[in-house]
Amino acid sequence: MSEYTNFRERVYRSLPKSNLEFVSADDSKSISNEFPELPENYSEFLTKVGFGTFGEMGFTIYGGPLDADEIFDKTTASSLNNYIFIGDDYSGWMLAYDTSVQPHELVFFNHSELVPFEKGKEPKTIQEFLVNELFPDISRL
């Protein structure tokens, strides 16, 4: 069983009201072509764990990345052009990749304000973010 399959099963055991759908291989390829700078584990996550809600409206991973101008007004978006947004909590907290650093790092926003992760505990993958920052019970199953 792959780490992604195992993670998806733990999500549904811990958060049974989750609603995840897989991104198709064709859609994943389109995303990779449009956003070649994103890490490979991002597209693997979408195709093997899925996108959608974790828990009952707890957090959502989008079915594809969004540029800041797809979320924010023009003025705000212009200051966030180094970020590609991949999820949110329906209340203004958003997960994004910072494309100004190599390799790209996951970052968290409260509305349009960057909120740093605790030093030394920056998540490297979406799974780490979900477990460490939002749903620690997933890791216990």
Image (spheres, helix red, strand yellow):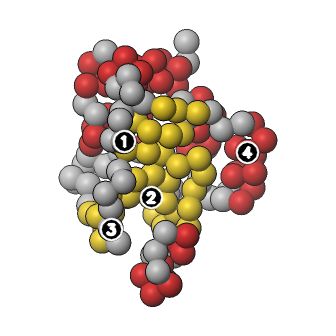
Task: From the image, tell me which residue sits under label 3.
Answer: 111
| Residue farthest toward the top in the current orientation of the protein | 1
- Which mark sits nearer the N-terminus, 4 or 1? 4
Density class for disc 1 (Cα within 10 Å; few <14, some 14-19, many ≥20) is some
**Nearer the camera: disc 4 or disc 1:** 1
> Considering the numbered disc 3 on the image, is that residue within a helix, a strand or a loop?
loop
Cα–Cα span, label 2 and label 3: 12 Å
Visible residue check, residue 44: no
Looking at the image, is 74 positioned above or below residue 102?
Answer: below
Looking at the image, is 123 positioned above or below residue 18?
Answer: below
> Considering the numbered disc 1 on the image, is that residue within a helix, a strand or a loop?
loop
Cα–Cα span, label 4 and label 1: 24 Å
Task: From the image, tell me which residue sits under label 1.
Answer: 57
Q: Nearer the viewer, residue 107 or 78?
A: 78
Amino acid type, callout 1: Met
> Considering the numbered disc 4 on the image, is that residue within a helix, a strand or a loop?
helix
Location of the N terminus (image quadrant): top right
Task: From the image, tell me which residue sits under label 2.
Answer: 96
- Which mark sits nearer the N-terminus, 4 or 3? 4
Residue 74 picture location, percent across and down: 50, 84
